[in-house]
Amino acid sequence: QVQLVESGGGLVQPGGSLRLSCSASGFIFSSLPMSWYRQAPGKERELVAIISELGDNTNYGDSVKGRFTISRDNAIDTVYLQMNSLKPEDSAVYYCHAERRGWGQFNAWGPGTQVTVFS
């Protein structure tokens, strides 16, 4: 059974930092890209960052470029999101995501972790 569990969310002041973690199980972690999404109240879920299977390629949403860093540790099946210079508009529920297409397909989401940036 594929499972993703996020942790590390919380309350932080503008300019602060948080590090999110997502622990994965139930599939070969190093075989898939991993991504982080976020969803704020009343808004659509948006892609924050994505990292390739080996971690050698990353891409970011325009709103977080230069402030957030995605990384992964395939030895412990975990993906991270380092968030620096946080802004109130970064407040959202952050979700970890993995998808396999074709044989053995799945589309998995974690339950999410709340990040609140308050003045």
Image (cartoon, grey):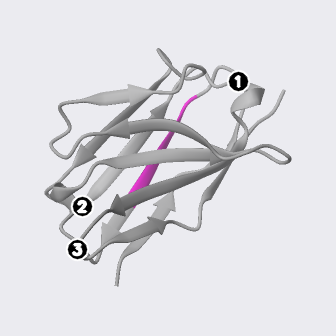
Query: Of marks 2 and 1, which one's residue comes earlier in the chain?
Result: 2
* First in residue order: circle 1 vs circle 3: 1
Residue 119: within the magenta?
Answer: no
The secondary structure type at the circle numbered 1 is loop
Rendering coords of residue 3 (x, y %) = 40, 75
Q: Earlier in the sequence, mark 3 or mark 2?
A: 2
Label 1: few (<14), some (14–19) or many (≥20) C-alpha neighbours in 10 Å = some
Residue found at x 51% / y 66%: 110
Nearer the observer, disc 1 or disc 3? 3
The quarter of the displayed image where residue 16 is located:
top right
The residue closer to the viewer here, 100 or 58, is: 100
Taken as a whole, is the magenta stretch helix, strand or loop? Answer: strand
Question: Which residue has dot 3 on it?
Answer: 103
Measuring from the top left, give residue 101's x and y in whole percent.
31, 63
**Contact (Cβ within 8 Å) of mark 2 with mark 1:** no
Q: x, y (%) of residue 99? A: 37, 60
Q: Amino acid at mark 3?
A: Trp
Where is residue 27 shown, x and y percent of the image? 24, 72
Residue appearing at x 19%, y 46% in the figure: 53
Question: Which amino acid type is marked by label 2?
Answer: Asp
Compared across the picture, whether 39 is left or right of 104 comes to right
Q: Nearer the viewer, residue 78 or 29?
A: 29
Residue 111: which quarter of the image? bottom right
**What is the magenta range?**
17-22
**Residue at the far front in the pictured view:** 102
Name the residue: 71% across, 44% down: 92
Binning the other alpha carbons within 10 Å of mark 3 as few (below 14), some (14 to 19) or many (20 upward) gives: few
State the CA–CA distance, disc 2 to disc 1: 29 Å
Q: Which residue is mark 1?
A: 87
Identify residue for label 2.
Answer: 77
